[in-house]
Amino acid sequence: MEVINAIGRRKSSVARVYVSEGTGKITINKKELETYFPSAILQYVVKQPLNLLEVAEKYDIKVNLDGGGFTGQSQALRLAIARALVKINEEDKKQLKDAGFLTRDSREVERKKPGQPKARRRFQFSKR
């Protein structure tokens, strides 16, 4: 099997994933998964598509992560891994789609408007 690559995005985070056959090692920006995401919840989010298909020990994953915070990065990585798994085996698509791992969460931060303190918040109105 050659190297399969895929991309995942969430908020302002971009995850580029390179999947090859291996022993289940996940390397993010030249660091181990446990070092990059110390939180067990974020590690779980990243491994969700692999655990669903029971292929966590079958592939080595190399990741370039850029932008955003840790939550957005972990969810971008989950989407990228799910897309790569579909490229590897097309029959897994329905299972991943039903679990919601192939849906791009398109919510972005709304820009701040002039004359307002935040995007939608207005300054307090004073009648007198």
Image: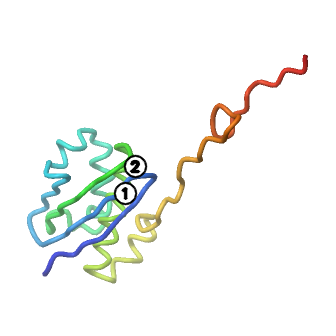
**Res 49 → quadrant:** bottom left
Taking the image as shown, residue 76 lies to the left or right of residue 127, namely left
93 up-or-down from 70: above or below: below
For the residues bearing labels 2 and 1, Cβ distance under 8 angstroms: yes
Residue that mark 2 sits on? 72
Q: Residue at x 21, y 44 (%)?
A: 36
* Disc 1 element: helix
59 up-or-down from 12: above or below: below
Q: Residue at x 17, y 61 (%)?
A: 62
Three-letter amino acid code of the residue under disc 1: Ala
Taking the image as shown, residue 122 lies to the left or right of residue 2, namely right
Where's residue 125, x and y in %? Answer: 82, 25
Quarter of the image for the N terminus: give it.
Answer: bottom left
The one nearer the camera, 19 or 95, is 19
How many residues crowd mark 2 within 10 Å: few (<14), some (14–19), many (20+)?
Answer: many
Where's residue 39, x and y in %? Answer: 28, 39
How far is disc 2 from disc 1 in space, using C-alphas? Answer: 6 Å
Count the labels in the image: 2
Taking the image as shown, residue 4 lies to the left or right of residue 96, namely left
Q: Residue at x 54, y 54 (%)?
A: 107
